[in-house]
Amino acid sequence: MQIPQLHVGAGTAAGPLTIFPVWTAGHGRLGISTGLHADLAVSELATGARVGQLTVRNNGKHAALLLEGELLEGGQQHRTCARDVLIDTGETVDIDTFCVEAGRWEAGQDTHRCQARRAPLSIRAKMAGGGPPEAGSRRQEQIWERVRRFDAVRGPSATSSLPEHLDRFGSLDRHRFTAPKPLDGQRGVVIGVGGQPLLLEVFGTATLFRLHYQQLLDAALLDAALLPAATQNTVPMPGQLARDFAAIAGTIDFGEFYSEGVRRHDSMRSRNILGIRGPVIAEGMAVRLPHREPDIAHLSCWNTNHPLMEAL
């Protein structure tokens, strides 16, 4: 399977970002909730808290999509979801997570907040395609190191907390940038930073996209803060680079849907997908509803040649 045909619109400059709207030719109705519309309860494991896992229950009326890089704040320490996961209504699952707050382990704190905030791509890219995110693993150490980069450029956090940096951004920076509003039917974006494409993120429906749009931009603006000021202030990225990037992503083959890793839900099936073509890595979630061909519910594609992705 591949991404349905992509259409990239005209770009708009927003501070250090150039934002291009994206449309796809997918079906457009999936019956999935996500973001702040999903009724998810997140807690530490009943068998004992672990850095690399949390328990999630879907109390809502629809299957819920929790995104890779979505922050789960609170508990014994802040975490981020390691990969996309679809949770059926009434279902309870243990999900893989990474810590994004190296300096806190607060025993007795159990409940996490789901505010649909996303980790910046410079951190999310470290989570892709690997095994279980055990504490002390190389990937976890790399994620802590990347959070410490924000401590260096944005001012230290007492617990090296990624949510704290997003809090500071929300109160100090967002008002300086006017991002374009989503257009009718828009299902995704290409984001350029420093004159180069950084990210293509696309959803199976326009509604799913809208529920994550602002949080995605906030995370990209925080990413951009890691670049030198001269790089941040380059001219807007040309549209041809956005179209070329989307064209590469559109050729990635994710294989047959019914392969290893398919999960069964009451009314649908889901599978994590991962693909690479040249400098582009793509990871996300595909779903299959009854009597329909598989659809891509969510996909993140990033440019490994971008300066923010150095040392991957």
Image (tube, rainbow, N blue to C red):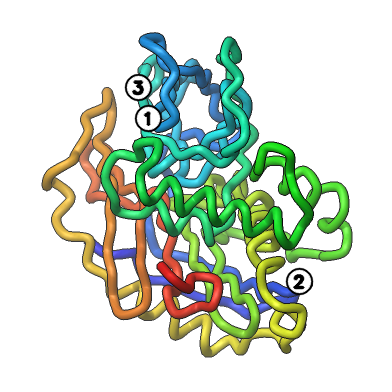
Q: Residues within 10 Å of mark 3 (few under 14, many from 20)?
A: some
Q: Mark 3 to mark 2: distance in Å?
A: 38 Å
- Residue drawn at the location 35% of the way across and 24% of the way down: 94
Q: Residues within 10 Å of mark 2 (few under 14, many from 20)?
A: some
Q: How many marks?
A: 3
Looking at marks 3 and 2 on the same chain, the residue that comes earlier in the sequence is marked by 2
Image marks 3 and 2: residues in contact by CB distance under 8 Å:
no
Q: Amino acid at mark 3?
A: Val
Please state which of residues 269 and 176 is positioned toward the viewer in this rendering: 176
For disc 3, the marked residue is: 93
The reply, left or right, for residue 12 in relation to residue 184 is: right
On the question of residue 183 being in view, the answer is: no
- For residue 117, above or below residue 20: above
For disc 2, the marked residue is: 14
Q: Mark 3 to mark 1: distance in Å?
A: 6 Å
Please state which of residues 4 and 92 is positioned toward the viewer in this rendering: 92
Q: Residues within 10 Å of mark 1 (few under 14, many from 20)?
A: some
Say which element carries label 3: strand
Q: Which of the 4 image quadrants contains residue 108?
A: top right
Q: Which mark is residue 95?
A: 1
Q: In the rendered view of the protein, which quadrant contains the N terminus?
A: bottom left
Q: In the rendered view of the protein, which quadrant contains the C terminus?
A: bottom left
- The image position of residue 144, as x and y in percent, is 53, 48
- The image position of residue 100, as x and y in percent, is 56, 41
- Residue drawn at the location 39% of the way across and 50% of the way down: 139
Q: Amino acid at mark 2?
A: Ala
Please state which of residues 196 and 226 is positioned toward the viewer in this rendering: 226
Image marks 3 and 1: residues in contact by CB distance under 8 Å:
yes
Say which element carries label 1: strand
The reply, left or right, for residue 2 in relation to residue 78 is: left
